[in-house]
Image (cartoon, rainbow, N blue to C red):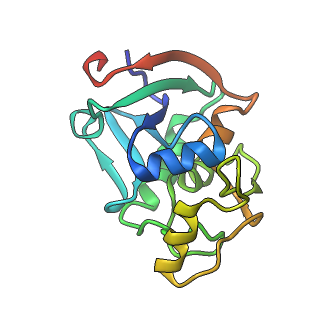
Amino acid sequence: MLANGDLIFVRDESDMGQAIQTSTGNYSHVAIYLDGMIYHASGKVGVICQEPADFFESNHLYDLYVYPELDIQSVKERACRHLGAPYNVSFYPDGEGFYCSQYMAEILPIFETIPMKFGDGEQEISDFWREYYRELGLPVPLNQAGTNPSQLAASPLLECKERNLHDSDF
């Protein structure tokens, strides 16, 4: 089912996942499948490459997208160049390391940045994000240039391949 170059978009029920999905759309995470491994920026360990069995989780749903003009070799070279980089916990454009969609936009430079949103439909900045940034000791980067998984998935350059897959489908 997984093919070289597939972009994997994730929906999950964690607090962070729900906060991201509430503020930005359907997805909370994005990764790419290259030569049998999954490359992504993990909130736990930073930019990593891991076996699919270690990536897919039972409490998540997965949608697969493809970029038909993907140059596997150049994307993999860029992906490997950033392995070991820290996770950009601030989501600031100039923050150290990468968050997941920032990493994808770096290794597959076809995506534009957009003003970042942190609302929940009722407040411009949700309680979750207020607390998150309070703990970081930073202002919320509202409207700063950034990316998010849902925005990447909405790119007209991508084609949806499969929807609503479970870990057992892989």
How far across and down, in percent of the image, does residue 14 sit?
Answer: 38, 46
Along the line of sight, the residue nearer the viewer: 127 or 50: 127
Q: Is residue 135 above or below residue 123?
A: below
Res. 80 image quadrant: bottom left
Examine the rendered structure and indicate whether residue 20 appears above or below residue 8. below
Image quadrant in which the C terminus is located: top left
Residue that appears at 36% across and 40% down:
38
Q: Residue at x 52, y 75 (%)?
A: 96
Position of the N terminus, as image quadrant, is top left
Pick the front one: 6 or 131? 131
Residue 163 as seen in the image, left or right of residue 59: right
| Residue 11 x, y percent position in the rendering | 46, 34
Q: Which residue is depicted at the point 52% across and 78% down?
A: 134
Q: Horizontal and vertical percent for residue 18?
A: 49, 45
Q: Residue furthest front?
A: 122
Residue found 39% across the figure and 21% down from its top: 2
Residue 6 at x, y = what percent?
Answer: 49, 28
Identity of the residue furthest to the bottom in this view: 137
Residue lying at the far left in this picture: please name it: 53
Q: Is residue 26 above or below residue 128?
A: above
